[in-house]
């Protein structure tokens, strides 16, 4: 299912500053290779969102920023995080996503979760883990087989699997993804190696090809 281009909103920097109380560190809910992620409020406070702001020292730059926008603004699936909008005002690179209440999968595998308003520990049961694996696999299957162009994520890991209020898993962070045309005659895609070391398919790392 494809979203219209208009569904990906373009925010001004002023709107983002208002949404995050001028990037208040008290609202930081995560930090990754791209930069800090803030809990924010848009539409007069009616909508809670996650706002990812690029760090000037980040190894990820404009190419990853625009790849994320291009990829997610054209895709919609129950197991893919929704991109609400972006801002490139005043040379900033900012992405605005739906807010995922239960954070990342890695939070619940290795850390205390942010359950409710406190710091209760929520340990995933094996049934929970299986459901999350199945949900992530369904998202990947959609990317590989149910889009006009196959989308290779290239950075699937526990920090890039988010959990909503119902513990439904959604794949996020498409900055390293690659779109390829499907063809019956095409058996692999030659590409530069991208992704996080330790999560890469060994065959992909060694051959620099991705099996279809």
Image (cartoon, helix red, strand yellow):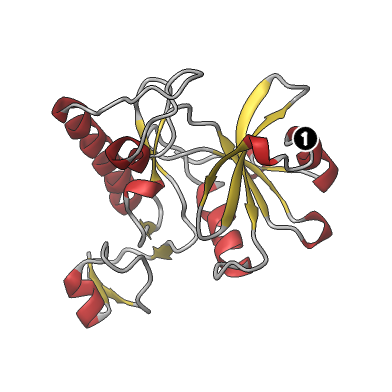
> How many marks can you see?
1
What residue appears at the point 35 percent right and 76 percent down from the top-left corner?
193
What residue appears at the point 80 percent right and 55 percent down from the top-left corner?
89
What residue appears at the point 38 percent right and 48 percent down from the top-left corner?
159
| Nearest the eye: 137 or 164 | 164
What residue appears at the point 37 percent right and 33 percent down from the top-left corner?
112
- How many C-alpha atoms fall within 10 Å of the one at disc 1: few (<14), some, or many (≥20)? some
The reply, left or right, for residue 51 in relation to residue 72 is right
Q: Position of residue 160 (x, y in %)?
A: 40, 48
| Nearest the eye: 142 or 52 | 52
Q: Secondary structure beneath disc 1?
A: loop
Which quadrant holds the N terminus?
A: top left
Q: Is 182 above or below relative to 42?
A: below
Q: Position of residue 23 (x, y in %)?
A: 73, 43
Residue 25 occupies quadrant: top right
Q: Is 109 above or below relative to 60?
A: above
Residue 186 in sight: no
Which quadrant holds the C terminus?
A: bottom left
Residue 84 occupies quadrant: top right
Q: Position of residue 39 (x, y in %)?
A: 62, 34
Q: Is 119 above or below relative to 52?
A: above
| Nearest the eye: 31 or 148 | 31
The reply, left or right, for residue 32 in relation to residue 95 is left
Residue 12 in sight: yes
Residue at image mark 1:
21
């Amino acid at each position: 299912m494809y979203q219209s281009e208009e569904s990906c909103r373009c925010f001004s920097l002023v709107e983002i500053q208002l949404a995050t109380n001028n990037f208040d560190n008290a609202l930081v809910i995560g930090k990754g290779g791209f930069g800090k992620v803030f809990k924010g409020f848009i539409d007069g406070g009616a909508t809670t969102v996650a706002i990812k702001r690029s760090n000037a020292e980040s190894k990820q730059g404009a190419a990853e920023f625009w790849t994320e926008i291009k990829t997610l603004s054209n895709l919609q699936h129950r197991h893919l995080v929704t991109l609400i909008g972006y801002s490139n005002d005043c040379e900033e690179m900012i992405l605005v996503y739906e807010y995922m209440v239960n954070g990342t999968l890695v939070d619940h595998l290795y850390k205390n979760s942010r359950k409710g308003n406190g710091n209760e520990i929520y340990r995933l049961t094996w049934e929970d883990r299986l459901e999350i694996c199945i949900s992530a696999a369904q998202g990947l299957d959609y990317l590989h087989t149910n889009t006009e162009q196959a989308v290779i994520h290239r950075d699937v890991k526990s920090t890039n699997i988010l959990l909503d209020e119902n513990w439904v898993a959604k794949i996020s962070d498409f900055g390293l993804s690659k779109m390829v045309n499907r063809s019956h005659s095409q058996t692999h895609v030659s590409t530069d190696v991208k992704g996080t070391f330790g999560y890469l398919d060994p065959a992909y790392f060694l051959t620099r090809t991705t099996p279809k």
